[in-house]
Image: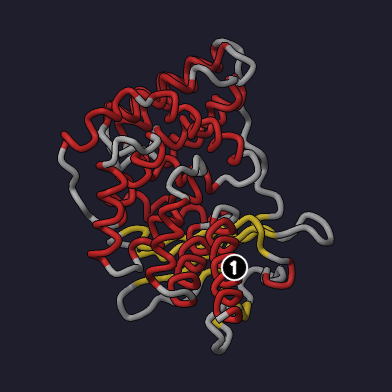
Amino acid sequence: MSDKIINTFQQRRQLTQAIEAMGDTRTEAELTAAARRIAHTYPADLVLSTLLKYLDTPKSQLRGGLGHLAALLPGDDATAALRSAVANRQNDPQIRITAALILERFLGQTLPGALISDLEDSNEVAFQSLREAVEEGRTNRHILLEYVTQMRETEAGVALMVMDMLARLEPHDRVELLRLIAQDDRDAVARDALQRLAALGTTEAGEAAARALHILRFSLPPSLAEIATREGRKLQFGGVHYRPPAPDGWRALLAPADTGGNQVMWVVRNPASSGSPGTILGFMLNARAGILQMFASETIAAAHVPPPHALGRIVPVNDGGGGEPVAMLEIPFDVGRQLVVRAQAA
């Protein structure tokens, strides 16, 4: 009996450590892989009971991990437990908000308005989560992406409220979140974010805001890209300038197209110095359908970054699947950039 108690205690401790480690992941792929490992390693009832204890976390990355984990558990049990957490008004608002987010975003559940109507006044809880995301985002940019992704699952009014709360932060801490929010599918939200970015031009974050507007020219639909261009030009007239850096050190690799016309392209930056990581942005492109898939990492170990080759040479690339290396062609960086731009416009 004592051995069983000890083993159960150790299992709970290991599970707790594994769940907390999800908050330290740096990409969506790492996050989902960590959730799968937990779901496959520990009993479902133990995972669910432990998951519920972390609903009060202010960390966006960990909240996303809890959602992925809940989606891997027996549906009825997870749904019932999370609905109970939302309905219990004795719970801390953060617990109820996280449970509602998981139900709607990861489990596809629709919650009646009466169940969460009293949470509308939980602005201070929301601000604490926002501040936590910004602080973590300084060292892990994926945190901000996860925060904004979760926000897009809510009503437009929530996005506008978040942008109002951003005014309580330092100007430099607002720029990256506003840039991400400006890519929201909801036109009113995107326009509001663009205007707020432009307003930062008169602050100490002016150059960072000009940089964000410059980037958005290439990632927004035409009507919104025009606003970003116009606001960026206004900042230039006001003496706030942003000059894009030269693409020194960047390369592009292109794989042959498959029978469906899909073509993999990598944009690569080799490590700047010995021991530092490299960067890879991978795209699945189709001339008609556009960008089908994309991944990116700024922390690729130097050993896994394909070494530079002369233009037009074949580069053997390990795709991580354990099979034979994939042959890719070293192409001019500008050609690779144009392929992405054309795919965006498809």
Which amino acid is tagged 1?
Gln
Residue 180, picture quadrant: top left
Residue in the image at 74% along x and 67% along y: 302
Helix, strand or loop status at disc 1: helix
- Figure coloring: secondary structure
Q: Residue furthest bottom?
A: 324
- Is residue 211 shown to the viewer in this render? yes
Q: Which residue lies furthest to the front in this view?
A: 1
- Is residue 327 shown to the viewer in this render? no
Residue in the image at 82% along x and 56% along y: 273
Viewer-side residue, 226 vs 128: 128
Viewer-side residue, 66 vs 188: 66
Question: Mark 1 sits on what residue?
Answer: 14
Q: From the top left corner, tell me how far across and down residue 237 is, in percent.
A: 54, 12
Q: In this view, does 116 lie to the left or right of 209?
A: left
Q: From the top left corner, tell me how far across and down residue 38 is, in percent.
A: 49, 70
Viewer-side residue, 299 vs 267: 299
